[in-house]
Amino acid sequence: MNMKKLLCTLAAFAMVLGLTACGGSDGTSGTGAGETAGTEAGNDAGTETAAFMVGATGPLTGGAAIYGNAAKNGAQIAVDEINAAGGVNGYAISLRYEDDTHDAEKAVNAYNVLKDWGMQLSLGSVTSKPCEATSAETFADRIFALTPSASSVATIDGKDNMFQMCFTDPNQGTASAEYISSQNLASKVAVIWKSDDVYSRGIRDTFLAEAAARNLEVVSDTTFADGNDKDFSVQLSDARDNGAELVFLPMYYEPASLILSQASGMGYAPKWFGVDGMDGILTMKGFDASLAEGVMLLTPFNADADDERTTAFVASYQERFTDIPNQFAADAYDCVYALKQALENASATPDMSASELNDLMIQQFTTMTFDGLTGSSMTWDASGAVSKSPKGMVIQDGAYVGMD
C-alpha cells in the first residue's frame, strides 16, 4: 500500500472510532447545523479526504419537516452502521444534511454550502421542487445524486447522473388507478389535487389517464394551491354531490389531514386513497389519527412488517429518535446502502474526484441489482428511475396494515 492510501486508511479508521465520542445523543457531530457523523475535511483542490463525503438538502424545518428529518435520520442510521462495520472499502462515510425548508432557491443555496464543504456524492433533495433545482446543479457539476423521495419526472429528466430510490409520480398515479380498479374499491371516484405542486400534478395526470383506460369514472376533479389550502368545503361538496364513493388524494399529509378533518365535520365518509406523501400523517402533531382510520395508500415500506431487516431498522430508529420511521426514512436508509454497494463494486476510494465517482456510479447503478427495506431485486434504467413494486396499505388501529 502506498503512503497516500495508508494515511487515508488510518484517518478513516480513526474517524470511525471517534464517531461516538464526537457525536451527540442524536448522532450529530456537533460541527455544524447540517453535518452528521462527519469531518470538516473537504475535497477542494489539493485537500485530501479520509471519507466519502455525502451531502443532501431537505426540509428540516417548516411544514414538510417530517419528510426531511425522517430522510436525514434514516440515512444517518445507515451511515453509522456502515462506519461501525468498517466503512466502504475501508473508508468511512461522512454525511451532511442542509435545511432547504422545501424551497427551491434555498435548496440551491444549501447545495452550494455542501459543495464548499467537499461533497463528492449527493442524496439530492428530499422533496420534488427543490430537487428539480439541485439536480440541475449536480448534473452541471458532475456529482452523482440518488434522491430518496423526490419523485417528479423533471427531477431526473435529461440528467444522466440523477437517480431515484422512490417511485416516479407517473408510476404512482398509474399504480393507484390500477389498484382501485382491480380491487373494485369504487365505481365513482373524485380527485383533489394541488395545482402548484409538481408532485401532486404529476400523479393526478397519470391517474386520470389510467382511470379512463380502465373505465373508472372520475366524477369530480378539483384542485387548490398555496393561499387557498385551508378550506376544502368546495372540493369536498363537489365530490359528495357527484356521488364519489372514493376520494383520491395525490398530495402530502398536511393538506390531506385538513381534508379528512373537514370531511368528517360535514358528515362525508367516502373511502380515501393516498400516495407515499401521505406517509407521516399518523405522527403529525395536533392531528387526530382516528380520522385516518381506513385510509388506503401505496407505499414501498411498512414499519409493521415482521421481516428481520425491517424490525431491526424500526427498533434502531425508535431507540434513537423515539418515533416510528416512515417510508422517507426507509428510502434514505436504502440510498446509503445502495451507494455502499456501488462504491464497493467499483473499488472506489475517497481520494477520487467527484467526477470520477460520478462516472463509476452511473455505470454501477445501470447494471446492478439491489435488495433493501423498500424492495427486493431493485434495478435502475438509464433514465434514473427505479423498478420496484408498491405495497397496498390501510390504516387500522393507528398503524399501517398490508392489503392483499
Image (spheres, rainbow, N blue to C red):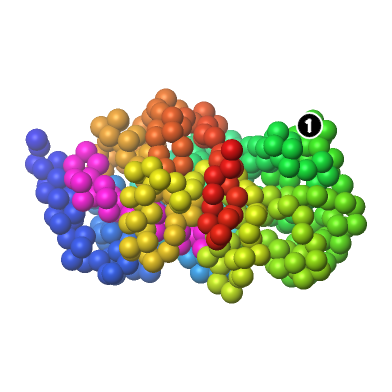
Q: Residue at the spot x=43%, y=29% of the render?
A: 377
Residue 217 sits above or below residue 97 on the image = above
Q: Around disc 1, counting alpha carbons within 10 Å, would you say few (fewer than 14), some (14 to 19), or many (20 or more)? A: some
The front one of 172 and 135 is 172
| The quarter of the displayed image where residue 342 is located | top left
Residue 314 image point, x, y percent: 38, 54
Give yes or no for residue 58 being in the magenta stretch: no
x 83%, y 60%: residue: 235
Q: Residue sitting at 64 percent across and 41 percent down?
A: 172
In the rendered view, would you say 327 is above or below 227?
above
What residue did someone put label 1 on?
214
Q: Which residue lies furthest to the top in this view?
A: 367
Query: Is 245 displayed left or right of 287 in the figure?
Result: right
Point out residue 86 in the picture as x, y percentages from the top left corner: 19, 45
Give the magenta-colored segment's residue range: 66-94
Say whether residue 72 is magenta: yes
Q: Residue 353, percent across and down?
A: 32, 41
| As drawn, 241 above or below 227 | above
Q: Which sits in the foreground, 30 or 220?
A: 220
Residue at the spot 77% in from the left edge and 59% down from the top edge: 269
Which one is nearer the viewer's eye here, 220 or 60? 220
Left or right, residue 54 beside residue 245:
left
Q: Is residue 172 in sight in this rendering?
A: yes
Circle 1 sits in a helix, a strand or a loop, which is it? loop
